[in-house]
Amino acid sequence: MSDHTQLIPMGVKLTTDIEHRPDRRPEFRYRARVRWTDPNGGGRKSASSSVPTEKEAEAWISRMERAAGRGITPRTLTMTLAEYGDENWDLAMRGLETTTLDPYTAGWKLRVIPVLGHIPVVNITNGITDRALHFWVADGLTVSSVKNSLAPLVRVMEQAVRDGLIDFNPSRMSGWQRLYKKAEDELDDPRSLALNDWDALDELANALVERAHNHYRGWGDIVRFAACTAARIGEVSGVRVKDINRFDWTWDLCRQTTTAPGGLIDKGTKGKRRRTVPIIEEIRDLVNWRMNVVGNDPMARLFTGPRGGRVTTAILRDATHWDEVVVSLGYEYLRRHDLRHTGLTWFADAGVPIHVLQKIAGHGHITTTQRYLHPDKSSIEKAGRTLSRHLSADRRAPQAASPSSAPAEAGVRHLRLVQ
């Protein structure tokens, strides 16, 4: 009789057999079975599994033999990643500090389990992990969010290796940051991800509001504000009334909304880089309207969901049916993070100096900012004409020194030479 719940005692000797049953349904044609004697006097025990091919039956027996060498349950061999992770979480995460464990826990619950949790541990492959990574990238996650999702997955799968469930860890991916960067930046050309102009942005914002439940205006405000400030959606969610300066129309960007084990929290910006961002005329009425709505509380959030909650890129996507809307408008490629690419591209095309654009973007390296420049032929020719005008102006400038002062200046030069 099959028994899929018995613990195989460590070190017991298994007897095995494979039975071919041609009269059964194709998926049950082969039955693999193992038997052992309970060393505690409990008699003979057994476990079995029905599979479609003899090769799969042999593979199952091989896993059971490894299980007997390690003392794990036959049930573990069919556990999903979610089940196995819950049962072995503390063991897999041992040695981690709380500051590391918290984001790993959030990544596991919010990203790994929804994408991979239903798959049996023994069925997870390099290809499955690779597809999960691409899914997270396409969803607009930051590199730190991807890291905090991949790291707990690696640790849980490493525990499965130690338990003998699998022979190698399929979630260990070398160079995934380069893969992420390539996918995010579309072959180092983030400009290709930008909307063309204000009219395109306005059309997108209106369409998202129209598609959203109750036509909530806030979704359109968030989209316009994010694009015109070149900000991430999490950063827009973090804006408080006190962060907006309406005297010089700037935004003190100092926090972002992000995920944590207990839900959404506010924390410092990516790289801990506080920055000042200009608020252009096109969105000043929008900002004024929202500040009037939220009132005088300096800590009130400027942008929220329809129920006053914090916003993430996933919440914006689901609430507005983003994927359907962008396809209908002909922007199949467009993600929420591309609103930031749009703003940075517009700033660059407007002629904002690269060192200023770097500060607005909060980039740690100027090479990241340089990818938003567009040095086509016309731009290069314009740069040459600009330099020529500058040099011509210098040549035409009147001499500041008068003839009467020439001897004195010559004397100073002579004194310097003598010294």
Image: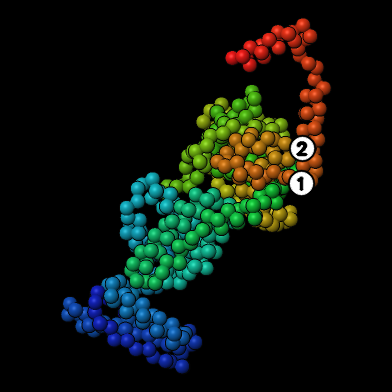
Look at the picture and state if 65 lies above or below 161.
below
Q: Residue at x 50, y 45 (%)?
A: 258
Displayed quadrant of residue 303: top right
Q: Residue at x 51, y 58 (%)?
A: 175
Q: Residue at x 49, y 67 (%)?
A: 126
Displayed quadrant of residue 58: bottom left
The residue labelled by disc 2 is 383
Look at the picture and state if 308 lies above or below 57.
above
Q: Nearer the viewer, residue 313 or 156?
A: 156
Name the amino acid, label 1: Asp
Residue 99 picture location, percent across and down: 38, 45
Q: Nearer the viewer, residue 91 or 260?
A: 91
Q: Residue at x 36, y 64 (%)?
A: 159
Look at the picture and state if 324 lies above or below 388.
below
Residue 149 picture location, percent across and down: 47, 55
Name the amino acid, label 2: Ala
Q: Earlier in the sequence, mark 1 or mark 2?
A: 1
Q: Which mark is residue 376?
A: 1
Residue 215 seen anywhere in this rendered image of the structure: no
Displayed quadrant of residue 38: bottom left
Residue 419 picture location, percent across and down: 59, 14
Q: Nearer the viewer, residue 333 or 374?
A: 374
- Helix, strand or loop at disc 1? loop
Look at the picture and state if 359 lies above or below 168.
above
Left or right side of 268 for 33: left
Q: Label 1: how many residues lie within 10 Å, few (<14), some (14-19) or many (20+)?
A: few
- Helix, strand or loop at disc 2? helix
Q: Label 2: how many residues lie within 10 Å, few (<14), some (14-19) or many (20+)?
A: few
Residue 19 seen anywhere in this rendered image of the structure: yes
Distance in Å between CA atoms under marks 1 and 2: 11 Å
